[in-house]
Image: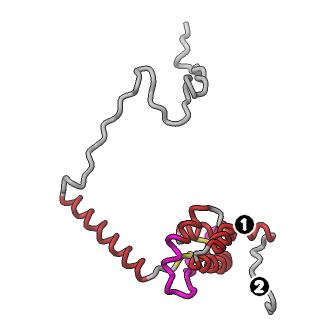
């Protein structure tokens, strides 16, 4: 029997379990859908639904409470500005777990943990799909107004310098010293 057993331990220490769940919930709020094991999804769902409820409250105390748990500030802002308004008419049940089968490596049962879409979200997504399909049709018909002109290759600033693309291999300012050329059999003259 599981009397007075509140949560799954997930075979981790308390600090590791808390870190895993914080990362899962942050990723769920950021990407709106994550893939994980069923046990982790069930635990993360409990926490995510509480945070969305705090997001619906919208006051300073709720924001501070969410900030203590969520790993990134931009995700907290997304929760309060975007995600919480989706569920103003809904009292719980903000997430769903969709089982997708077993992992090949260890046969762990995996699932998607995702935010439930409201009717307004579904309609907005449908409008986006329609607009994208119309844009594809215009492109296929050869409408010149939707095509972008090809960008010409930019010439280097100086003849001796190339435009920088990150860390340079050769010598010069900001780069590493040039490596000596390797001698191969073809480059060595005999006789």
Q: Is residue 56 visible?
A: yes
Instruction: Report the side of 155 relative to 59 (left or right).
Output: left
Q: Which mark is residue 19?
A: 1
To which quarter of the image does residue 80 belong? bottom right
In the image, what residue occupies the spot 56% across and 34% down? 167
Q: Is residue 109 visible?
A: no
To which quarter of the image does residue 91 belong? bottom right
Position of residue 12 relative to residue 140, above or below, is: below
Which class describes the residues within 10 Å of circle 2: few (<14), some (14-19), or many (20+)? few
Instruction: Return the residue at label 2.
Output: 6
Looking at the rendered structure, the secondary structure element under dot 1 is: helix
Q: Nearer the viewer, residue 92 or 65?
A: 65
State which quarter of the image contains the N terminus: bottom right
Instruction: Report the side of 149 relative to 165 (left or right).
Output: left
Q: Nearer the viewer, residue 87 or 163?
A: 87
In the image, what residue occupies the spot 58% across and 75% down? 58
In the image, what residue occupies the spot 49% across and 77% down? 85
Q: Please tell me which of labels 2 and 1 falls first in the chain.
A: 2
Is residue 96 one of those drawn in magenta? yes
Kindly report the distance in space between the C-alpha atoms of the residues bearing marks 2 and 1: 18 Å
Is residue 83 one of those drawn in magenta? yes
Position of residue 76 relative to residue 154, above or below, is: below
Q: Position of residue 87 (x, y in %)?
A: 51, 81
Looking at the rendered structure, the secondary structure element under dot 2 is: loop
Q: Position of residue 60 (x, y in %)?
A: 63, 71
State which quarter of the image contains the C terminus: top right
What residue range appears in magenta? 81-106
Position of residue 64 relative to residue 181, above or below, is: below
In the image, what residue occupies the spot 49% across and 36% down? 165
């Amino acid at each position: 029997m599981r009397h007075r057993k509140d949560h799954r331990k997930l075979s981790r220490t308390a600090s590791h379990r808390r870190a895993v769940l914080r990362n899962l919930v942050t990723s769920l709020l950021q990407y709106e859908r994550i893939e994980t094991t069923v046990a982790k999804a069930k635990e993360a769902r409990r926490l995510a639904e509480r945070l969305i409820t705090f997001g619906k409250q919208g006051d300073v105390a709720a924001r501070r409470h969410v900030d203590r748990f969520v790993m990134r500030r931009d995700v907290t802002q997304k929760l309060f500005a975007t995600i919480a308004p989706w569920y103003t008419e809904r009292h719980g049940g903000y997430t769903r777990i969709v089982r997708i089968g077993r992992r090949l490596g260890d046969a762990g049962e995996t699932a998607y943990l995702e935010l439930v879409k409201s009717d307004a979200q579904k309609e907005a997504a449908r409008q986006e799909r329609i607009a994208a399909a119309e844009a594809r049709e215009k492109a296929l018909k050869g409408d010149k107004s939707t095509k972008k002109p090809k960008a010409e290759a930019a010439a280097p600033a100086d003849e001796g310098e190339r435009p920088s693309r990150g860390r340079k291999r050769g010598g010069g300012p900001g780069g590493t010293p040039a490596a000596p050329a390797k001698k191969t059999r073809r480059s060595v003259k005999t006789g």
